[in-house]
Image: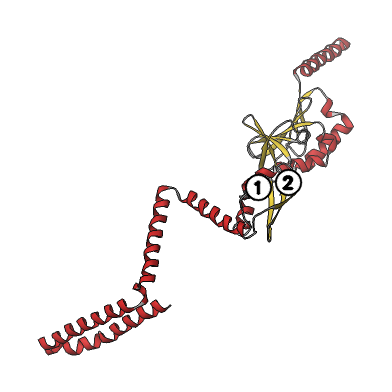
Amino acid sequence: MASTDSGRNGARGRGSQAAPSAATTTAGTGAPGRTRIVDRAIINSRRFFVGLSASRVVTCGSGTWLVALLFAATGAYGLQQGGHMPAAIETARDVADAGANFMGFRITNVNLVGQNHVSPGEILATAGVKPTSSLPFLDAEAARTRLEELAWIKRATVQKLYPDRLDIQIVEREGFALWQKDGKINVIARDGTIIAPYSDDPRYIRLPIVVGDGAQTHVVDIVDALSLVPGVRDQVRAAIRVADRRWTLKMRNGVDVRLPEQGLGDALEELAVLDRDKQLLSRDVTIIDLRLPDRVTVRLSDAAYEARQADIKAQAKAKKGGST
């Protein structure tokens, strides 16, 4: 503050002596007036530099700090340009941690709650907790943000309890379905987030399977609708997203059930009734088309079609023989 005040006094003296009105009043008086203006400028400049040199800005101690700041800024610029800034920051953090640890703030107790799929080691590494970490220099908000970037973690809470305890609470996403696309199968959450590649984990075996582009973003629609018709749901092998507009169910016996874009729940309810009353899903058919609201269309299998054609011909022959 003292050096700033000194600098302001010098500038104010110069400004008051070199006011524009003084220059205007002497401009028309010829050479003597111009001489007085030059003399005043010289005097004022001397006063300014004398005041500046007498101020604390350029005293030995402050000058040392200014030089140190200059070198620090130059060094930081060089580190940034050379790509060494992250390493320098890490080193500075280690030094700060060492000082805090010396004062008794080393993180010695970490309480983890809620993790199931994510290992404790991965949680600590992501949060930036090392054996040498101290509580004061751990950024809890940054640690929380990094943890929530992990696919399995839906929410995280990081709390520092002085002098040496860290509490981390995790809420993980749950596997909602299996999504197959381009020959790859991933476990996805209810919101469609990919959380893990498929494995033979027993928790994944009974998850519903959806296939195709857009299936992951509409998975809730089909899974929730099928949950209302368990008799149909239990016969479904996979739900295939068609042109990201509608669904086709691939049944375990190979039958395809084509569902409409609108009225998904009504179509599934109708299918459940037809299967209960007429065992439609057990018939020798390949396609059941429910896309039209006023009718159900089926396509017979080749064997069933040939058998039906032969039956029709036999009936026609019998009818013709009876009429002769």
User: In the displayed structure, does residue 134 sit left or right of residue 23?
Assistant: right
- Residue at the spot of label 1: 124
**Residue mark closest to the camera, 1 vs 2:** 1
Give the SS element for disc 1. helix
Foreground of the two, 189 or 261: 189
Q: Which residue does the image show at 61% across and 58% down from the upper left?
A: 102
Residue 59 horizontal/vertical position (percent): 35, 73
Residue 82 horizontal/vertical position (percent): 40, 48
Label 2 is placed on what type of residue?
Answer: Gln
Instruction: Tell me how far mark 1 sits from mark 2, CA to CA.
Output: 12 Å
Total of numbered circles in the picture?
A: 2
- Residue at the spot of label 2: 115
Foreground of the two, 2 or 218: 2
Which numbered tag is attached to residue 311? none
User: In the displayed structure, does residue 12 sit left or right of residue 304?
Assistant: left
Q: Which residue does the image show at 80% across and 13% down from the upper left?
A: 310
Can you name the residue that lies furthest to the left here?
A: 31
Describe the colour scheme in one phrase. Answer: secondary structure
Q: Which residue does the image show at 62% across and 46% down from the upper left?
A: 125
Label 1 is placed on what type of residue?
Answer: Leu
Up the image or down, 136 lies above or below 232; here it is below
Up the image or down, 161 lies above or below 288; here it is below
On-image quarter of the N terminus: bottom left
